[in-house]
């Protein structure tokens, strides 16, 4: 299998395959671009069906991190790591130690953080063997101190982005009575749903976690639907907050929402699906723009910026400015919002 001929290979600077026989580690680290700074991105552990699937994921995710950091105005490049395995059964202290050693060998070109299948505790363990890990320091929040987990910041940024998209597409300043379908209510999705509920929105949710669904029903008044039914709901906003590639040839014809705006990475299965959304009159908030709150949070920690929580929140709220610029330029140029976001990011990290 050649990485260079992969459809998702986008002039990545470095792709490293890592293995450790003793712990069973099989991982891939992709550094997409370091023009603006070191490549910071999460470490995902997932039971990929095969190596090709893992390579595709790490290439797409690392590229997305470059674009995300550039639009967010951070002095960071883009990278990602994926570990092939089931995080519930295959993740061990020895495996995490081996992964930490692999990250350390890159000498700081790549900085790891938690992602799907990994946790703040995992990153804290890795920090014992490499300094090139972020998202491990406790931070202040509305309810006191919280862990280094950046998901609350991701949820806040996504909430800000939905508010901006609603103003753009529906002309509404209030979210009261807004109908939102949230696909996936993990750490980010649930916090986003909570914020929407507090703003007066009605919620429809799906997930594979029965306990999370029950909690959403009881605490947020959410209506639970089957995963396949989430696409065709008569709602204002479809918010993907699980895995990527959910906007595809199969789901697109089902969509009735006026807006697609959620926290998941790589929501478009292919770039052409962004144009298809535009032609269908659906406003798309580019995923790496709207979900940038987490990387902003981790960047402040990694860079040692001690400007206080208010400064962090103000930076996250600039997602509103970024989206308004993208939406306005997309209108003027009659282009999909994803293409415009890419152009803005490339103008910044290729300078």
Image (tube, helix red, strand yellow):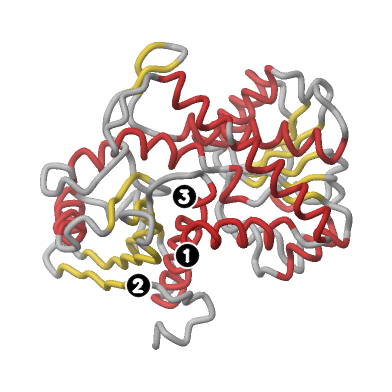
Instruction: Choose the circle earlier in sequence order: 3 or 2.
Output: 2
Task: Identify the residue position indicated by label 3 in the image.
Answer: 69
Q: Is residue 306 left or right of residue 257?
A: left
Q: Depth check: 293 or 93 in front?
A: 293
Residue 190, visible in the rendered structure: no
Can you identify the residue that label 1 sits on?
350
- Splitting the image into 4 quarters, where does residue 234 fall? top right
Contact between marks 3 and 1 (CB within 8 A): the answer is no
Residue 109 vs residue 21: left or right?
right
Give the mark, 3 or 1, whose residue is nearer the N terminus: 3
Q: Nearer the viewer, mark 3 or mark 1?
A: 1
14 and 239: which is toward the camera: 14
Instruction: Classify 16 as above or below 302.
Output: below
Tell me the residue that label 2 is attached to: 13
Quadrant of the rendered structure where residue 321 is?
Answer: top right
The earlier-in-sequence mark between 1 and 2 is 2
């Amino acid at each position: 299998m050649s990485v260079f001929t992969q459809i998702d290979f986008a002039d990545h600077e470095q792709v490293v395959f890592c293995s450790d026989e003793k712990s069973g580690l099989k991982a891939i680290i992709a550094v997409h671009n370091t023009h603006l700074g070191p490549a910071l991105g999460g470490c995902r552990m997932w039971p990929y069906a095969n190596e090709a699937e893992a390579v595709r994921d790490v290439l797409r995710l690392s590229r997305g991190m470059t674009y995300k950091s550039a639009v967010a105005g951070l002095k960071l490049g883009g990278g990602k790591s994926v570990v092939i395995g089931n995080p519930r059964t295959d993740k061990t202290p020895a495996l995490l130690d081996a992964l930490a050693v692999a990250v350390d060998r890159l000498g700081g070109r790549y900085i790891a953080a938690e992602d799907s299948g990994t946790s703040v505790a995992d990153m804290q363990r890795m920090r014992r063997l490499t300094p090139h890990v972020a998202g491990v320091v406790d931070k202040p929040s509305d309810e006191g101190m919280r862990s280094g987990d950046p998901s609350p910041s991701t949820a806040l940024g996504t909430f800000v982005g939905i508010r901006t998209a609603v103003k753009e597409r529906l002309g509404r300043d209030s979210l009261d009575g807004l109908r939102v379908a949230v696909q996936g209510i993990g750490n980010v999705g649930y916090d986003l749903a909570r914020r929407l509920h507090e703003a007066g929105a009605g919620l429809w949710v799906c997930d594979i976690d029965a306990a999370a669904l029950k909690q959403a029903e009881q605490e947020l008044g959410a209506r639970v639907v089957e995963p396949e039914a989430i696409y065709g709901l008569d709602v204002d906003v479809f918010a993907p907050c699980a895995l990527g590639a959910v906007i595809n040839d199969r789901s697109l014809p089902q969509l009735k929402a006026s807006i697609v705006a959620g926290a998941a990475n790589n929501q478009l299965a292919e770039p052409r699906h962004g144009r298809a959304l535009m032609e269908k009159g659906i406003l798309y908030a580019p995923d790496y723009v709207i979900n940038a709150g987490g990387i902003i949070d981790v960047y402040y920690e990694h860079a040692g910026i001690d400007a206080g929580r208010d400064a962090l929140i103000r930076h996250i709220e600039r997602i509103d400015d970024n989206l308004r610029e993208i939406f306005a330029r997309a209108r003027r140029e009659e282009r999909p919002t994803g293409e415009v976001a890419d152009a803005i990011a490339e103008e910044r990290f290729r300078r």
